[in-house]
Amino acid sequence: MKSNKLSNRRNVRQQGGNTNPQQHSSNVRLRHKFRFSVPSTGFTGGISDTQVLHSTGGIATVANTTITNWVQSFKIRKLEIWSAPSTQGAASTVSVEWFGFGNSPNVEVSDTTLSVSRNAHIVTTPPRQSLCAFWQKATGTGLFSLVLPAGSILDMDLDLILQDNDALYTVPVTTATLGNVYYLALDHQTSDLIVPVSLHTTT
């Protein structure tokens, strides 16, 4: 009898002290690094939460008209950018300006190179209390601005939460096959210059 009680207590400890199912976070969460290139024309301008969300992918729900996203919200972990000048002695500058929130100021990070053998290179994370320090949805709010010369590469490291009975986000496009998956340019609906690398895209 005594050995059975000891065995039962041992089993309970091995199960975390509770014989019922443990609580868990039911939302589907992912982390992914999205890579973009600026192949021909440089980009200077702002990026909104809506544009970031649309770049994370969706499915064409109306042919040649609409893509519906599967991501409900995101948080930016890090941005990393590389760029080289087109010719030796020419300058190439890349920058990210994080937009402030409340009493926090805008914070800009930049780097410049004059050598074709050395990239301009920045690695930057959202400053504390900036807009990007928080989880985001598609509200049309500007999050940061970029300076990306032609030939730049941008990596965007994101935490993602997938849709679960939430209001779906849609985005207009001009070309899409019904049911196909597309990942949009980071600056979609502005200029479509910051295009995803090795992912199916459209405009």
Image (spheres, rainbow, N blue to C red):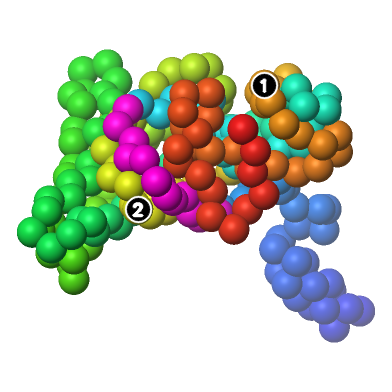
Position above or below: 143 against 119: above
Which circle, 2 or 1, is nearer the viewer?
A: 2
Badge 2, how many Cα within 10 Å: few under 14, some, many 20+? some
Give, as a three-letter code, the residue at label 2.
Gly
* Residue 152 image point, x, y percent: 34, 52
Range drawn in magenta: 32-45
- Magenta-colored stretch includes residue 78: no
Q: Residue at 53% x, 30% y: name it.
A: 188
Q: CA distance from mark 2 to mark 1?
A: 27 Å
**In which quadrant of the rendered view does residue 76 lie?**
top left
Helix, strand or loop for the magenta stretch, by majority: strand
The disc, 2 or 1, on the residue closer to the chain's N-terminal end is: 2
Position above or below: 87 against 94: below
Q: Quadrant of the N terminus?
A: bottom right
Q: Quadrant of the C terminus?
A: top right
Q: Which residue is mark 1?
A: 172
Number of numbered callouts drawn: 2
* Residue 45 image point, x, y percent: 32, 27
Would you say residue 134 is visible in this rendering? yes
Element type at marker 2? loop
Q: Residue furthest right?
A: 1
Q: Residue at 76% x, 34% y: name it.
A: 176
**In which quadrant of the rendered view does residue 97 lie?**
top left
Closer to us: 41 or 32:
41
